Amino acid sequence: MVSKKYLNDYTIEYVEKPNGRIKSRAVYIGKLFTFAETIDSVRRTRKQFTLLSLAVWCLYILPFCFQSAATGTYYIVFPHAFIFIPALGMSQATFELWTAKAPLTREQSDIISSRAPASALAMLILSGVTLACFLLRLLISPGVMLFPGDFVFGVCEAFLVIASYLLFRRRNQVATCEVSSN
């Protein structure tokens, strides 16, 4: 299924089968794109994105497995919970890096070169806000945060900030450019 944004990049082609039935299929006629970096650099980036995305998901889920005062504090847990959305976008961009073959369609190019940096930046901001709120709560009422789960939450959030930063730093490695039509 093609979204409305990319609908004009396709046309319908009708092919007659040997048994007389007419089969229709979508044919891509839009602009083609390729990676701005070398294939080896894209492969390295693909592996790094995979490892960092797995780390992000583990660091996102792990704090919810332990009892902690942080997961019961709304201004700490809300930004942490919203990390799910950019983490999902990052996972989709990583999956697209593994499955896409050059030349790329406009849709693939947009997912890889636009969604990956935006998702990494959103994760960086949300995890930074969560860590700041966690540290603020720790300074305001240190006696409340005595659960071992609070230590796990703080460590996971700090590593989540680092993983998000590393993903954002690699954003230039997934840049795409239009293929000349010669």
Image: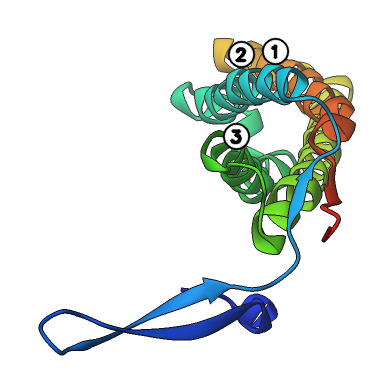
Q: CA distance from mark 1 to mark 3?
A: 14 Å
How packed mark 3 is, by other alpha carbons closer than 10 Å (few <14, some 14-19, many 20 or more), is many
Q: Closer to us: mark 2 or mark 3?
A: 2
Residue type at mark 2: give it.
Answer: Val
Placement of the C terminus among the 4 image quadrants: bottom right
Compared across the picture, whether 21 is left or right of 63 comes to left
Element on which disc 2 rests: helix
Q: Quadrant of residue 165?
A: top right
Between residue 25 and residue 160, name the one nearer to us: 25
- C-alpha separation, residue under disc 2 versus residue under disc 3: 11 Å
Query: Are circles 1 and 3 on residues that touch, CB within 8 Å?
Result: no
Query: As displayed, is residue 17 above or below residue 106?
Result: below
Q: Residue at x 63, y 51 (%)?
A: 85
Residue occupying the point 70% across, 71% down: 30
On residue 20, which mark appears? none
Disc 2 to disc 1, how far (Cα)? 5 Å
Can residue 128 be seen here? no
Judge by depth and name the residue closer to the eye, 84 or 152: 84
Which one is in front, 50 or 78? 50
* Element on which disc 1 rests: helix
Query: Which residue matches tag 2?
Result: 152
In the image, which disc is placed on residue 155? 1
Residue 181 in sight: yes
User: Marks 2 and 1: CB-CB under 8 Å?
Assistant: yes
* Residue 75 locus on image (x, y percent): 75, 45
The residue sitting at 76% across, 45% down in the picture is: 34
Point out residue 140 in the picture as x, y percentages from the top left corner.
88, 26
Type of amino acid at the residue the image marks with label 3: Thr
Comparing labels 1 and 3, the label whose residue is closer to the camera:
1
Give the residue number, with chain letter if any, for mark 3.
71
The quarter of the displayed image where residue 39 is located: top right
Precedes in sequence: disc 1 or disc 3:
3
